[in-house]
Image (cartoon, rainbow, N blue to C red):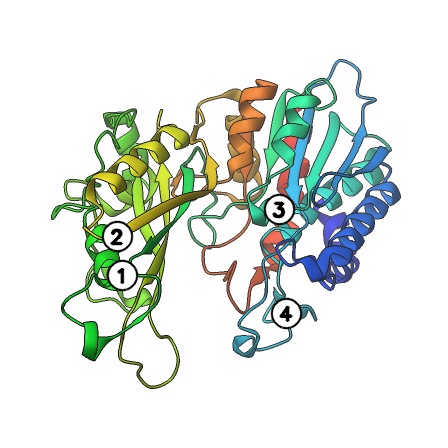
Amino acid sequence: MKESISLHKDRYVEQLKEFLRIPSISTLPEHKEDVLKAAKWLASSLEQIGMENIEIIETEGHPIVYADWLHAEGKPTVLVYGHYDVQPADPIDLWESPPFEPEVRADKLYARGATDDKGQLFIHVKALETLMNEDGKLPVNIKLCIEGEEEQASPNLPSFIQQNPEKLSCDAVLISDTSFIEKGQPAICTSLRGALALELSLKTADSDLHSGVYGGGVPNAAHNLVRLLDSFHDHNGKVAVEGFYEGVPVLTEELKQEVAAIPFDEEKTKKELGMEALSGEKGFSFLEQTGVRPTLEINGITAGFQGEGIKTIVPCEASAKISCRLVGEQDPQTVYEMIEKHVKSNKPVGTKVTVKQTIKAKPVLLDSQSLMIQKAADAYEAVYGVRPLFPKEGGSIPIVEVFSRVLDAPVVLMGFGLPSENLHAPNEHFHLENFTQGIETVCHYLKSLS
């Protein structure tokens, strides 16, 4: 198997380059045809390796690609999920090579989507091809459900899953869209925080006012926005929204130990980030703060004159984008309503405030000791010679909770990226050693399930 993967590596990489050349940016309407092109390219690739019942399923947005191979009688069924859409490439001028012209440098493949998620998704396609070429069949039953809207929080996939539980029924959901701890240290993520995103809009007067005529005598939307945003936290870094921590679990010693087992160097982290100090909720370690505790972050602020030079006005409008990461039993809709109530209670005098929800996703906690996850750990150890750790990711993959709940199946987050690979940033890349070893690891895993 290893020899076969090595023999075909160059061909696999060239095929991945073809996939990466398609600018399937789901969030930009002008790339709608490119997203469809990527779906068709993927469907064709699945047909070539022997997958069956291939469909390009239309949604209200971008299509879902489905395929299966169901001839392993009496064997488990694994549903492979991934996404073929990518983030925008801006700012283009910071890329060392064009984002949609893939280039290999120092055994790393540079392109938008290289690690998130086309490269990791393609690992599964090539693993299935390797197994089919080796035995003329697969060791387990396989279904694939690949979407084109993950980078816009999967607006249409949840309803598709809920409407097709039988079509997607399985014994495990296999996803590669996460990272190792560091090079050579595999990881199986067993916790993902939920998400809530919203926008605050403040308005005072009907128009901006002359600061010489009105300054000091009328409400300033920018000042009032700052006051309102400052009310969201206390001096210990704790979220000050009443009821916010309802449903947040107390950290057990077992969970603390799993988190503490993850390597972390504070001085190295500060140096890499160009920071003098870290901060956050007091009483918790950095990895606890970023993995298993909830947050409320200000993502962006807009107010007043933004052009070159100065315009002496009292701004009448201001806005902010806010996101929360949620854990345990926190419900995003309930948290949103708590924030609405907080805003109403704390809005400055003379200010009209509107709140608009944009994203919501529930948190998910996976059992690291489940059979399906432990067999994945065995597969990593067989290929990399190192047992994976079980980190708690601070990010969100909203669809994981939906798969787990609707299909009542364990989710295995079997990632092959590295934290240093610039996902969502210029010069995104994928280490090709993890591409080839990833194919081998997935092959080991699927065989072990038979």
Q: Find residue 263 and report its horizontal and vertical position in percent.
A: 32, 48
Provide the secondary structure element on which disc 4 rests. Answer: loop
Quick one: label 3, few (<14), some, or many (20+) residues within 10 Å? many
Going from the N terminus, do you reach mark 3 or mark 4 first? 4
Residue of label 4: 99
Task: Determine whether label 1 and label 3 are within 8 Å by CB.
Answer: no
Provide the secondary structure element on which disc 2 rests. Answer: loop
**Is 151 above or below relative to 333?**
below
How far is disc 4 from disc 1 in space, using C-alphas? 39 Å
Residue of label 1: 221
Going from the N terminus, do you reach mark 4 or mark 1 first? 4
Please state, as top left, top right, bottom left or bottom right, where the N terminus lies in the image.
top right
* Residue at x 84%, y 35% (from the top left corner): 54
Residue of label 2: 351
Task: Determine whether label 2 and label 1 are within 8 Å by CB.
Answer: yes
Which of the pair 274/352 is nearer the observer? 352
Mark 4 or 1, which is nearer the eye? Answer: 1
Residue 249 visible, this angle: yes
Residue of label 3: 438
Q: Find residue 63 and report its horizontal and vertical position in percent.
A: 74, 42
